[in-house]
Image (tube, grey):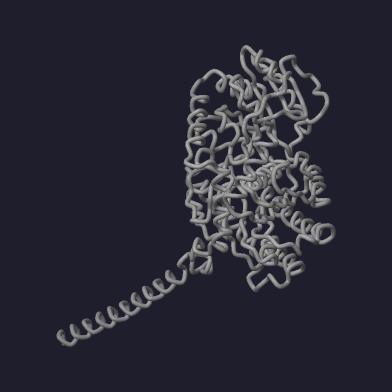
Amino acid sequence: MNMKTIHYIIFLHAMCLGNTYKILVMFPVPSPSHFILGSALARGLVNAGHDVTIVSPYKDKNPTENGKYSSIVLKGLADIKDPLENIKLFEIGESNPLTAAQLMYTMGNEVTNSTLESINSENSNIYEEKFDLVILEYFKNDALLALACHLKTPLVLFSTMGANLWVNSLVGNPTPPSYIPDLHLSYTDNMDFWQRLMNVFMYSAKKLNDKFFFLPFQYELAKKHFPHCVGEEGPLSNVSLLLLNSHESVNNPVPLVPNMINIGGFHISPQKELPRDLKEYIDNAEEGVVYFSLGSNVKPSEMRNETKKALLNALGKIKQKVLWKWDEDFLPGNPENIRTNKWFPQQEILAHPNVKVFITHGGLLSTTETIYHGVPILALPIFGDQKMNAAHAVAGGYALSLSISKITEDDISDALNQLLNDPKYRENAKKRSALMHDRQVKPMDLAIYWIEYVIRNKGAPHLRVAALNLTWYQYLLLDIISVVLIIGIILMFVSYLLMKKLCLSRKSDMKIKSN
C-alpha cells in the first residue's frame, strides 16, 4: 500500500468521524518562514478532513493530494520584501529598538493594504464564498480582522510568536511590563531596574503609536473595503481563539486567558531521509558537524567583509565539518571543511545525531526546531524578536549569543570551543527537548481540536474575558484610584480644617484663662 492510498484512507476516516468544515486560512506576510507555518496548519486541517483555502503571497509547490486543499496567491505581495532588502537587515539589527519596531509597523501597513488590493483585483470571489471559519495570521494587520465580520464567520488569529503586546490586547490578556519584555528588546523575564524602565518606555511608545498613527491608518483601510464592518472603535471583530506559535520549553511562562492556546512545534513534520550525498557527508564527519543558517529572509552575503572573514577564519580552524546556508553560488575564501548551499533540509539535519552546534539568527522557527532535536545554539540575532529569543536561550543554558555587528574571530572561536567541548550546553538542550516532547496532546492535534471547538460552539463567546468590555482606565482601575485619592484628599483637608479650628479654639480658651 503506497503513501497516497494511506493518506486517502486517513482522509475518508476523518470524513466519517466528524463534520467537514470549510475554512479560510490567510497568511499574508511575505516571508517564507511565515508561509511554512501557514501551509503546515492548512495541511493539518485537510488531514483532519476539512476543506481548506489558503491565501498567501506564495504558490504551494507541493500541494497536498489528500482532501480538499486550494491555494490562492496574493499577487505582488512577495515583492514587498524588496524595500526591506534595500534597507538591509544587518543594518536594521544595529538600529535602536524603536526604529526596528517602526519598520514592523510600516511593513504591517503596506502588507495589509496590498493584501486587500490584491483580493479585490484578482480574487474577489473570496468575498462571495461561504466559510465556516477564518484563520488569520496577525502581524499588525488590524484592518483584516474585519474580513471575518464580512464573511459572517468566527475569527481565529494565529501569532507567529508567543504572547506579546501586539496580540494580548485583542483577547484581553495581561501584559505586565515588570516581567514580560518587549519583543524588540534583548531581555529575559528577569529584568533589573533600568531594563524594566526601558521596557515600560517601549510599551508606552508602542501604545501611543498604535493610538495616534498605526490604528487610524488601519481603520481607514477597513472602512474603505468593509464599511459595514467598522464601528466607532475600529473594525468589528470578535476574536474567538488565538493560536500561539510558542511553548514553555522555548518561551518564558506567561499568563494566558482561556482562548489563547500554545501550539509551538506544530509545524515540525515527521523525519524524512536526508539526500544520500548529504547523509554521507554528515555520517562521515568523525568530529561531527556544525550547521550554520541565518534563516530565509537574511542574505549572509550582505554581511560586512570583516564579519565574513572572522566567521571563515574561526570556522576554518575547528575540527568539525560545517554546513553553511549561503545565498550565492560561490563563497570566496571558503576553507576545505565548509560546504555551502542555497538550501538545506534543516529539520532533517538537526535530527542527525552527528550535528553538534547550530549557528542561527535566533528566529523562533529555528529555535523551536533546534530545541525539538536537542542541539545547542550559537545565536547571531539580527532583527525582530531574535534578540529576545537568543536571550531566553542563553538564560536556559543551551546557547551562547554574539552581536553579529561586533564579532571578532576570537569571539567566535571562544564561543564554539565552549559549545563543542562543555557538555552542559548539550545536556541543557536535551532537557529542553524532553520538555517539548512531554506533552499530553500533539500540538497539531491541539490546534485542530480548538479550531473545531470554535466552529462547533458558534465562536465560543463563553471564552471571552470581561477585560475586553472595559476602557483602558477602567482596566487599570484608574477611576477607582482617582475616587479614593480624591476622597482621601478631602478627608485630609477637612481634618486639617478641624484641627486648625480646634487649635485656634484652645488658644482662645487659654488666652481667656490667662486674663
Which residue is painted at 51% across and 28% down in the image? 430
Location of residue 513 in the rendering, given as x and y in whole percent from the top left corner: 15, 86
Quarter residue 142 falls in: bottom right
Location of residue 80 in the rendering, given as x and y in whole percent from the top left corner: 80, 49
Quarter residue 351 falls in: top right
Q: Is residue 200 left or right of residue 327?
A: left
The image quadrant where one finds the C terminus is: bottom left
The image quadrant where one finds the N terminus is: top right
The answer to whether residue 96 shows anywhere in this view is: no
Which residue is painted at 27% across and 78% down in the image? 499
Location of residue 436 in the rendering, given as x and y in whole percent from the top left corner: 51, 36
Front-lying residue, 160 or 327: 160
Front-lying residue, 20 or 474: 20
Which residue is painted at 51% across and 47% down in the image? 194
The answer to whether residue 145 shows anywhere in this view is: yes
Callout count:
0
Q: Is residue 512 left or right of residue 350?
A: left
Which residue is painted at 83% across and 26% down in the image? 329
Task: Say above or below: 450 vs 315.
Answer: below
Task: Say above or below: 310 vs 201.
Answer: above
Location of residue 468 in the rendering, given as x and y in whole percent from the top left corner: 53, 65
Task: Say above or below: 296 vs 278.
Answer: below
